[in-house]
């Protein structure tokens, strides 16, 4: 394990404006953390009580390593917590969603309008035969109907599995098959950089050899009736004709699954992370209210897509459970020009802005003149997620976007954790490069492979030592894979990241310890990209690594051995790059492909990506005693 880090552990500390603590929901972090430690179950019960339960729980936590159940016996419905309780409690005419499309189109939904739209669509799903527990795959652009579809699934107890609409047909197919989805919901097109992406035809390819799929619901972006291509397809609006406007929320057991979300694994097969109703709802609501300090008059803009966990927790379930107004947009950060995001913040008075380091670095490169053109004074909190926020990017974000005033919340968490785990809570000094400290409710540490604590400033593995409500419950149809998270170091959850702690307990996350590459904040398994390459007729073997990239954090570099009869050529490089793009999607496209005669392997035949990486970076590969030659 690496022990010397070329990182700025002594970066300048930023002291937040004390006014931020005045009305903060969390209050003093240290006191809140001590309160949690003194009675963890009491702490979580108090947070859970802020939500509407149809039946109270009997037991807060049932921890039977490595499986946890939370709020056992409790009954809850997430869509009721995000909609009904606001409609009943004086927020019915308050804005829930503001949508701005790439081509300037705008739509708004009050809580009441959203509530009714969700109930109608939920009834349409029921009409199609959807029952509690059925899996529904969403492959949709970022339009209000995406949020409506999620909440409608939650309302009737169907389990949604959202696939980011930037994935290609094969990646979508693998996820539909694994989840055995009964319905796929899509739209005619997505819009990106002024171009239409034919989502519906990608779905048509993806559902071939997917026997579980009974219907494809197609949303027409222009709201005109859709011409149906097959008996499987139905029109998003036509199926809602004649359905009732009332759809009472299903009583969901706290431990019933809410959604499956696929994340890249270290094998070629993506992992279906399973989250449940009660614990997940508590985690998403708690972190929005106490970590983002979100209030009902906040206008929250999270630039992620619902296809990622960030979108699930911080576009939909968390902010709507708090009763905030959520801005959703289909925009790309630099289209039609790099001022677009800042103009939206000014136009809609965004108060909490949550984005990814890759976007921040891109804006840094383009220059301050773009954000400087706009009035960003509505912002009060700015956040970051997905990969380490390097000190230079922190400083730029704080100064140029936060105008030396807004606290920067660099939030560390994962698809598996469901909610923020480590950050610098409001009021605490901020140290650029460090995500921060475990939030109240989370017990985290940095340890060696045996689980011994490592001294400050020495690298180690990041672990979570106690279960938390929004932890994943299993990996879909792969409980063994789930258990690996908890038995790598007995009793603790090993997150798969390398980290280092300073004397004050601040944690800096350095990156993955396994074969995951993070490109622009998106997780890619090396094996997933490798198997896409090997599927090409010219490729005998492939190995991919992540290489540093100023903009994306990491980029994919591929090493390829060709089959006999194929010769290296620029044309083949382009062909393979295109092949990966079509198989997995644009994020997985290699930025470089090198042709090799041999790949470094262990005696047992495992590719040593570490050796390729060391060679690429011109550093010592470390221990190569297991190398075959
Ligand atoms: O390596 C860490 C990195 O992203 C991984 C989780 O990826 P995913 O499940 O796709 O979820 C991303 C959005 C929550 C982590 O294991 N990561 C996430 N946030 C940070 C981070 N690395 C450093 N700092 C962060 N703030």
Image (cartoon, helix red, strand yellow):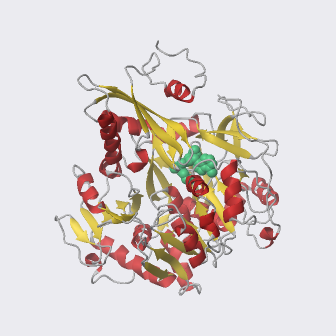
Residue 518 in the image: x percent, y percent? 52, 44
| Left or right of 285 on screen, residue 194 | left
Establish if 174 lies above or below 275.
Answer: above
Q: Is residue 513 above or below residue 365?
A: above
Q: Quadrant of residue 378?
A: bottom right
Task: Look at the image and tell me in which quarter the N terminus lies.
Answer: top right
Residue 72 visible at all: no
What is the count of numbered marks? 0
- Tell me the residue at 76%/53% (across/down): 37
Q: In terms of depth relative to the viewer, which is nearer, 544 or 148? A: 544
Rendered location of residue 492, percent (x, y): 63, 40
Q: Is residue 67 left or right of residue 219?
A: right
The vertical placement of 481 against 304, above or below, is above
Image-quadrant location for residue 181: bottom left
Looking at this view, name the residue that lies furthest to the top: 629
Measured from the top left, where is residue 587 in percent x and y?
43, 48
Q: Is residue 31 visible?
A: yes
Q: Residue at x 45, y 36 (%)?
A: 557
Q: Residue 569 at x, y = what percent?
A: 31, 31
**Rendered image quadrant of residue 323:** bottom right
Query: In front: 187, or 131?
Result: 187
């Amino acid at each position: 394990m690496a022990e010397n880090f070329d990182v700025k552990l002594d970066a300048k500390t930023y002291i937040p404006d004390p006014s931020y603590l005045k009305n903060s929901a969390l209050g003093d972090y240290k006191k809140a953390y001590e309160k949690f430690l003194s009675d963890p179950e009491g702490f979580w019960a108090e947070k859970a009580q802020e939500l509407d339960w149809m039946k109270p729980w009997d037991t807060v936590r049932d921890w039977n390593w490595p499986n946890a159940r939370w709020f056992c016996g409790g009954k809850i419905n997430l869509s009721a917590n995000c909609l009904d309780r606001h409609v009943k409690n004086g927020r019915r005419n308050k804005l829930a969603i503001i949508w701005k499309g790439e081509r300037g189109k705008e739509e708004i939904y009050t809580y009441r309008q959203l509530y009714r739209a969700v109930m109608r669509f939920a009834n349409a799903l029921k009409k199609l035969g959807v029952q509690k527990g059925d899996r529904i795959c969403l492959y949709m652009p970022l339009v209000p109907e995406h949020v409506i579809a999620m909440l409608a699934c939650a309302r009737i107890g169907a389990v949604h599995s959202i696939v980011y609409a930037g994935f290609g047909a094969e990646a979508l197919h693998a996820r539909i098959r694994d989840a055995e989805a009964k319905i796929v919901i899509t739209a005619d097109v997505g819009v990106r950089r002024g171009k239409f992406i034919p989502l519906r035809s990608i779905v048509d390819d993806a559902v071939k050899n997917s026997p579980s799929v009974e219907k494809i619901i197609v949303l027409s972006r222009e709201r005109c009736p859709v011409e149906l291509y097959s008996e499987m397809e139905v029109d998003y609006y036509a199926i809602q004709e004649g359905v009732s406007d009332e759809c009472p929320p299903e009583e969901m057991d706290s431990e019933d699954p809410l959604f499956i979300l696929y994340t890249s694994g270290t094998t070629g097969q993506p992992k279906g992370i399973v989250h449940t109703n009660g614990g997940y709802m508590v985690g998403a609501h708690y972190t929005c209210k106490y970590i983002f300090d979100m209030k009902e008059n906040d206008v929250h803009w999270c630039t992620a897509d619902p296809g990622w966990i960030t979108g699930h927790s911080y576009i939909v379930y968390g902010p709507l459970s708090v009763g905030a107004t959520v801005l959703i947009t289909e925009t790309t950060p630099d289209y039609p020009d790099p001022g677009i995001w800042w103009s939206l913040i000014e136009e809609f008075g965004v108060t909490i802005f949550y984005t990814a380091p890759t976007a921040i670095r891109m804006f840094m490169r383009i220059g301050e003149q773009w954000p400087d053109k706009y009035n960003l004074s509505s912002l009060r909190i700015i956040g970051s997620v997905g990969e380490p926020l390097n000190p230079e990017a922190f400083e730029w974000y704080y100064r140029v976007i936060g105008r030396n005033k807004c606290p920067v919340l660099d939030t560390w968490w994962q698809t598996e954790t469901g909610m923020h785990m480590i950050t610098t809570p409001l009021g605490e000094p901020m140290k650029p490069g460090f995500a921060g400290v475990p939030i109240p409710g989370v017990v985290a540490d940095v340890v060696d492979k045996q689980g011994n604590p490592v001294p400050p400033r020495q690298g180690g593995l990041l672990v979570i030592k106690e279960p938390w409500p929004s932890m994943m419950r299993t990996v879909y149809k792969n409980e063994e894979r789930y258990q690996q998270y908890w038995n790598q170091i007995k009793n603790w959850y090993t997150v798969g990241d390398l980290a280092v702690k300073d004397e004050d307990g601040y944690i800096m996350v350095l990156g993955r310890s396994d074969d995951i590459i993070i490109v622009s904040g998106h997780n890619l398994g090396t094996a997933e990209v490798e198997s896409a390459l090997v599927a090409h007729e010219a490729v005998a073997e492939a190995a991919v690594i992540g290489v540093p990239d100023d903009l994306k954090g990491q980029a994919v570099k591929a090493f390829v051995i060709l089959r006999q009869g194929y010769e290296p050529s620029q044309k083949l490089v382009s062909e393979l790059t295109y092949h990966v793009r079509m198989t997995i999607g644009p994020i997985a496209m290699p930025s470089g492909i090198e042709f090799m005669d041999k790949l470094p392997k262990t005696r047992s035949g495992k590719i040593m990506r570490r050796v390729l990486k060391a060679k690429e970076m011109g550093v010592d590969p470390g221990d190569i005693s297991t190398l075959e030659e």
